[in-house]
Image: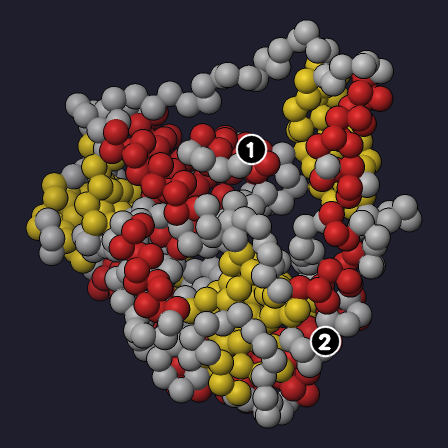
Amino acid sequence: MRILDFSLSPQEAADPGLWQQVLRRAAQTAETPCARILRESIDARSRQGVRILRTVAVFAPDEQDPAAGQEPFRYQDVHAGRPVVVVGSGPAGLFASLRLIEHGLRPVILERGKEVGERKKDIATLSRGLGLNAESNYCFGWGGAGTFSDGKLFTRSSKRGDTGRILARFHFHGADEKILYQAHPHIGSDKLPDIVRHMYATITGCGGEVIFGAKVTDLRIADGKIQGVFTEKTGWITTDTVVWATGHSAHDTYDMLHRKGLALACKPFAMGVRVEHPQDLIDEIQYHRDPGMAWLPAATYALTAQAGGRGVYSFCMCPGGFMVAAASSPEGQVVNGMSSSRRHTPYANAGIITEVREEDLKDFAAEGPLAGLRYQQAVEHLAMLNGGGGQTAPAARLTDFVAGRLSGSLPENSYMPGLIPSPLHFWLPEEVSVRLREGFREFDRKMHGFLTREAVVVGVESRSSSPVRILREADSLQHVQVSGLYPCGEGAGYAGGITSSAMDGVNVADRIAAI
């Protein structure tokens, strides 16, 4: 086996026949050698034009890849295993459950929402602007917010664990092999529902249990130990081990934990808007009108700026994507974005957000550790009011937002429930609005043409991270006051995104198994 690095034209990378020619030349053989791609990324800064960089393990024609046919995981029968209650089936809960099965433990998952097929119906109703089901939407249901998300798996949190095994679990359950080697792996909102269905089949087939429509509304705690959880569907479930993976949109669970006196903390988070451009414009800016553009995927970007001493940055950039209504309550308006696996729509969208710190929360100081949550809810409520109620969203042309004026019209866009012109610059909190507008000006200096009237900003992008942290011990990962209660994932304030949430769930499962 040899490890070789290649710098390819976009056409060489996309055309299997040309790629095989490159391999034969590199191996100096007439027969195409066996090859496994280890790493792939796009370099748009080369003087040769856009290049695709590949690192490849190459084998002689008569050699076999030692990784071929290997079983990556051993999911065992746990019908008789010790039960562990898992609250929530987002990435943290799902991956904690899969890891528990590897350890011989039996997960019992309590999910407040519905299974995937029923969620699809409710999301279709929501997208048509016909109403929000507060228990079945883009946030709640099997797979959590990840099921209908863009499925971006890039993370900088590799120090928390083996990200490769997280990607391998997705691949094992149906994700394309490309996620194993791409620098910025992506599954797609069209693929994820089937993948989480396959995870459901693994969990239940091995003996795990899933109960839908089971929102946990109370905990039983005695002598500093978890004793049970309560849902209206099941009544009290006696247990001494609970994985708390509810996600950051389950606002009512924060209220319940606070009422019960569990230690929580207000943490910094971020808030802003979602901006959508024509994808062709982003392609031209990023690829510099390279002749190989036809062979390249829809271009992406990652932008950062400093404004008034705070960071302003792009988040969850969705090339060839679309915007969606992501509220989980009729009292607020939230937008998000996603892409299918093909990334083929004419639009590119991203969250543009800025930091919200404790000093911004003075109007909500009486709420203690929930001050950030109340700030978030207040801004989402303003967005709902300024969007006209329902799921119609408030919006402005990007140039108008930066200039501080109301838009007379809005460009074509992907948001299905509809947009309404609104002075976002006026009603967004000043500390958010001013920094976003300054940040957009800086973005245009880095990507000339980014600031255009053909782009639209939509409010609000408020669920990028949790404003609350459920305090836990650094070593045991149990709650600081309650033995046997394991807060994890985004909702607990210890992760940000699918991969880091999944890793946190795996780490919690490992701690539980070690006891």
Image-quadrant location for residue 399: bottom right
Left/right of residue 414 with respect to residue 91 in the rendered view:
right
Report the residue at 53% width, 87% height from top: 421
Q: Secondary structure at mark 1?
A: helix
Q: Which residue, as the protein is rendered here, is positioned at the far right?
A: 47
In the image, 144 versus 286, the foreground residue is 286
Question: In which quadrant will I find the C terminus?
Answer: top left
Report which residue position mark 2 lands on. Answer: 451
Image-quadrant location for residue 126: bottom left
In the image, 237 versus 234, the foreground residue is 234
Q: Secondary structure at mark 2?
A: loop
Q: Is residue 357 visible?
A: no
Report which residue position mark 1 lands on. Answer: 177
Colour basis: secondary structure
Dot placed on the residue nearer the N-terminal end, 2 or 1 = 1
In the image, 424 versus 267, the foreground residue is 424
Q: Where is residue 91 shown, x and y percent of the image?
A: 40, 45
Number of numbered callouts drawn: 2
Q: Is residue 161 above or below residue 298?
A: above
Identity, as a three-letter code, of the amino acid under mark 1? Glu
Q: Which residue, as the protein is rendered here, is positioned at the far front?
A: 17
Q: Where is residue 225 shown, x and y percent of the image?
A: 20, 42
Left/right of residue 145 with respect to residue 399 in the rendered view:
left
Question: Marks 2 and 1, how far apart in space?
Answer: 36 Å
Report the residue at 41% width, 66% height from top: 326
**Mark 1 neighbour density, 10 Å: few (under 14) some (14–19) many (20 or more):** some
Q: Which residue, as the protein is rendered here, is positioned at the far top?
A: 62
Label placed on residue 118: none
Identity, as a three-letter code, of the amino acid under mark 2? Leu
Q: Where is residue 207 shown, x and y percent of the image?
A: 22, 29
